[in-house]
Image: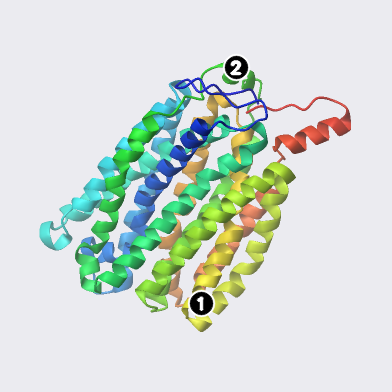
Amino acid sequence: MAAVEDVSSGSIPTSDGTLPPVLKRQIAAVAVGNALEFYDFTTYAYFAKQIGESFFPSHSPLVSLMASLAAFGIGFAGRPVGAILIGAYGDRVGRKPAMLLSFGLMGIAILMLAFTPSFAAIGLAAPVIVVLARLLQGVAVGGDVGPTTAFLLEAAPEAQRGFYTSLQYSSQGVSTLLGGLVGVALTNLLDPQALTDYGWRIAFLLGASILPIGFIIRRALPETLHGDAAASSDSQQWSWRPVVLGFFVLGGATVGFYVLAYLTTYASVVLHMKANVSFAATVVFGLANIIFSALAGALSDRFGRWPLMVIPRALFTLGIYPAFVLIVHNRDALTLLGAAFILGALGQMGVTGFVALSEALPKRVRSAALATTYAVAISIFGGTTQFNVTWLIVHTGDVMMPAYYLTVAAIVSLVAMAMMHETAPVILRRRALARGRPASGGA
């Protein structure tokens, strides 16, 4: 991969392939900013029960929860819009302005959610405003994934692309961890009624308070779209194959993410466990996400994307059913937290599929194509997962429905991963040397 110039400071990767400190800080800034955006988007899921009681009151707690989760799903409808518009903007104008635009939209949306009065105060206007805010959040997050992932891949040394690109998923784990920690703190400090009245709003405002800092940090980023690297990578050929396979890889991965994120609501509402214990499951899942997404990315730089996709995904698929049997049978904190960590660790190692898709896309269309593939898959599968699982539990009475739903999605993603081509530079170089010709492929 050609050296990527830091247009803001003149820094470039050093001759041994490592990044100078200033660029490492910029990479960290992108990851932190991404974590803040996903914190604000996914915090809704962790407080779905309280939000449902505030804006979608019903005599049945499960009906109120389903209405709240339906609004949560609506946010995913905005993702393809943001992916197409902001993703294309990132390919045309630059990664940095696209990231700044999505950050600004997220700030507006989160303030709308935090300050909307309850249904009891303003009636039907309340859920309408919530739905509009969720749509705007979807546009912001959908538009951010493509430019941020393209930046991480393009700014990384060739031998560390997997690790740096995996920070997209690890940073989402940071958002999960922060959401869980905030949830644990609030459930321990506030009684259930206070949590419903205003506690969940505190969680949103905490995220909103940090957004301006993230915006300032992102303004100092270099631009990776323009320069010599762009020209050298245009030789990559466009193919629909990685996009189609990537769609199913990401679809299965997002079902896994949102089923495991659903453990907070599932443990509280369905299994009737204490709220602080259920939020602790989110903390553990977030930790697993942070650690094992980055670990999988780093290992894939050495051993290749394909084995780091397929082997953990196969183990994840085999472990889903017994893990949920233990959770339902025992209904204690140790079992819930242990299952959340193990499934989270194996599931999030699927980040290497996302890396392989990113590498397979030509640079000139990477932001838009990656954002759109990701957003459509997430919208179809992620936006409906928690609602569908709750609906299945309500209509069948079977509390094992999350396990069945997740197993089907895991099998689909496993098949798609097994069909993907290897894209890790180190493996391609070894294969090319074995065949006696130069390695090909660009960033």
**Is the residue 338 above or below the residue 129 in the image?**
below
Which image quarter is the N terminus in?
A: top right
In the image shown, does 250 or 18 lie closer to the viewer? 18
**Is the residue 128 above or below the residue 5 in the image?**
below
Which image quarter is the C terminus in?
A: top right
Seen as rendered, the residue at the extreme front is 21
Question: Which residue is painted at 65% across and 57% down in the image?
Answer: 313
Seen as rendered, the residue at the extreme left is 121
Which quadrant would residue 94 be assigned to in this image? top left
Q: Position of residue 157 (x, y in %)?
A: 62, 32
Q: Residues within 10 Å of mark 1 (few under 14, many from 20)?
A: few
Q: Position of residue 193 (x, y in %)?
A: 21, 72
Q: Position of residue 269 (x, y in %)?
A: 37, 74
Tag 2 secondary structure = helix
**Is the residue 314 above or below the residue 440 in the image?**
below
In the image shown, does 322 or 342 lie closer to the viewer? 342
Dots 2 and 1: beta carbons under 8 Å?
no
To which residue does mark 2 refer? Answer: 231
Separation of marks 2 and 1 at Cα, in angstroms:
53 Å
Label drawn at residue 394: none
Q: Residue flagged by tag 1: what amino acid is it?
A: Leu
